[in-house]
C-alpha cells in the first residue's frame, strides 16, 4: 500500500504547514500529530488538494498556492458597516478583533473589525487569508484507498 499515489478519494495522512511569503507560519502539524483527510471530502480547498495529486507516501514538497487556487481575492462587498449600537456596550472594539456573527441561516460567521470611527464600525467578512499567496509545505505520511464508499 505504501506505493499508492494520491488520487480522487484517496485517504491521505500528512504533515503540512501554511506560511506567508515572509515566512510567518499560519498553521502547521509538523509539531503535532499529522492530519488525515479524504481527497474531495471538503477538508482541504481544491487548489491545495490538486497540488497533492500524484504524490506518494514519503514524498515531501513545497508549493505556492495563489489566491485564485486558495482563499480567493478579497471582495469589497464583504466589508460591512455597522452602527456601534449593534455591539454590546461593554465590548471594547478595536482593529483586528475577531467577532462571531450569525449569518442569514444562523451559521457562525467570523468578522474582523477593520476600523472604529465614532459610532461607525467597519467589519471585514473576507477570509483572513484572502488575497494572499500561501506557501504549502507537505510531507506525505501515508496514502490509502478511501473507505467512504462503504459507509453509504
Image (tube, grey):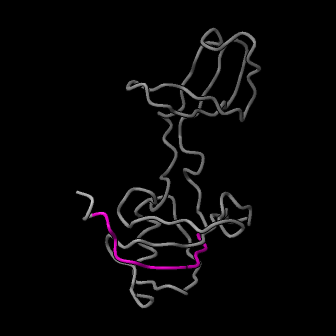
Return the x and y of residue 24 as percentages of the image width and height: 74, 61
Q: Could you say which quadrant of the image residue 32 lies in?
A: bottom right
Hey, which residue is sitting farthest front in the picture? Answer: 150
Q: Nearer the viewer, residue 135 or 32?
A: 32
Q: Could you say which quadrant of the image residue 148 lies in?
A: bottom left
Return the x and y of residue 42 as percentages of the image width and height: 39, 56
Residue occupying image coordinates x 42% and y 91%: 3
Hey, which residue is sitting farthest left in the picture? Answer: 152
Residue occupying image coordinates x 44% and y 59%: 45
Return the x and y of residue 30 as percentages of the image width and height: 68, 70
Q: Could you say which quadrant of the image residue 43 lies in?
A: bottom left
- Is residue 140 shown in magenta? yes
Residue occupying image coordinates x 32% and y 68%: 147
Q: Nearer the viewer, residue 131 or 17?
A: 17
Residue 150 is left or right of residue 27, and the answer is: left
Which image quadrant: the C terminus? Answer: bottom left
What's drawn in magenta, residue-wise?
Answer: 136-148
Return the x and y of residue 119 as percentages of the image width and height: 68, 12
Give the dominant element type of the magenta stretch: helix, strand or loop. Answer: strand
Residue 102 vertical placement versus 126 (above, below): above
Residue 49 vertical placement versus 71 (above, below): below
Q: Nearer the viewer, residue 95 or 56?
A: 56
Q: Nearer the viewer, residue 65 or 7?
A: 7
Residue 51 is left or right of residue 123, and the answer is: left
- Is residue 89 shown in magenta? no
Which image quadrant: the N terminus? Answer: bottom left
Q: How many marks?
A: 0
Amino acid at each position: 500500500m505504501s506505493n499508492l499515489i494520491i488520487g480522487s478519494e484517496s485517504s491521505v495522512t500528512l504533515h503540512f504547514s501554511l506560511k506567508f511569503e515572509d515566512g510567518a507560519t499560519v498553521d502547521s502539524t509538523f509539531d503535532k500529530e499529522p492530519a488525515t483527510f479524504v481527497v474531495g471530502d471538503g477538508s482541504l480547498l481544491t487548489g491545495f488538494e490538486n497540488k497533492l495529486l500524484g504524490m506518494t507516501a514519503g514524498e515531501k514538497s513545497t508549493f505556492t498556492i495563489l489566491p485564485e487556487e486558495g482563499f480567493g481575492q478579497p471582495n469589497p462587498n464583504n466589508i460591512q458597516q455597522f452602527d456601534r449600537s449593534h455591539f454590546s456596550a461593554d465590548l471594547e472594539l478595536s482593529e483586528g478583533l475577531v467577532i462571531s456573527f450569525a449569518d442569514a441561516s444562523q451559521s457562525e460567521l467570523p468578522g474582523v473589525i477593520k476600523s472604529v470611527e465614532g459610532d461607525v464600525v467597519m467589519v471585514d467578512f473576507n477570509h483572513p487569508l484572502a488575497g494572499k499567496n500561501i506557501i504549502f509545505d507537505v510531507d506525505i505520511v501515508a496514502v490509502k484507498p478511501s473507505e467512504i464508499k462503504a459507509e453509504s
